[in-house]
Image (tube, helix red, strand yellow):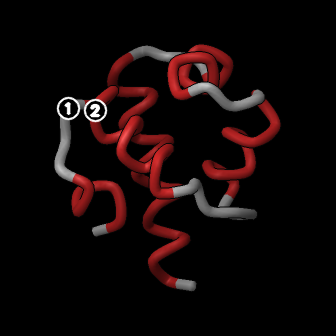
C-alpha cells in the first residue's frame, strides 16, 4: 500500500505544480471526476492505460508517478 500512497501524493503534487484542477486532469485522461479524485485520495489505482496518459500529461516517466 505504500506505493499507492506515493502515487496519490505524486498525482496531487504534479497537478498542483501544473496548475490543473482535478476536473481538468480527469477530462484529459478520459475518466470521471470521481474516478480521478479516488486516484489522488489513494482509494483506487488507475488502469495501465490511465497511468500512461497521466505520465504523458505531466511529461514524466511512469516510474515518477509511483516513486
> The N terminus appears in which quarter of the rendering?
bottom right
Question: Which structural element holds mark 1?
Answer: loop
User: Is disc 1 in contact with disc 2, using a CB cutoff of under 8 Å?
Assistant: yes
The residue drawn where x is 76% and y is 29% is 32
Residue 39, given in percent of the width and then of the height, sits at 64, 51
Q: In the displayed structure, does residue 4 sit left or right of residue 44?
A: left
Residue at mark 1: 59
Residue at mark 2: 56
Q: In the displayed structure, does residue 2 sit left or right of residue 61?
A: right
Is residue 43 depicted above or below 17 in this figure? below
Q: In which quarter of the image is residue 53?
A: top left
Residue 50, given in percent of the width and then of the height, sits at 50, 44
> The C terminus appears in which quarter of the rendering?
bottom left
The residue drawn where x is 46% and y is 61% is 7
Is residue 47 depicted above or below 32 in this figure? below
The 10 Å Cα crowd at callout 2, few under 14, some 14 to 19, many 20 or more, is few
Amino acid at each position: 500500500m505504500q506505493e499507492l500512497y506515493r502515487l496519490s501524493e505524486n498525482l496531487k503534487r504534479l497537478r498542483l505544480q501544473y496548475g490543473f484542477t482535478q476536473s481538468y486532469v480527469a477530462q484529459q485522461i478520459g475518466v470521471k471526476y470521481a474516478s480521478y479524485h479516488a486516484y489522488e485520495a489513494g482509494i483506487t489505482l488507475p488502469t495501465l492505460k490511465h497511468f500512461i496518459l497521466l505520465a504523458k500529461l505531466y511529461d514524466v516517466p511512469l516510474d515518477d508517478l509511483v516513486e
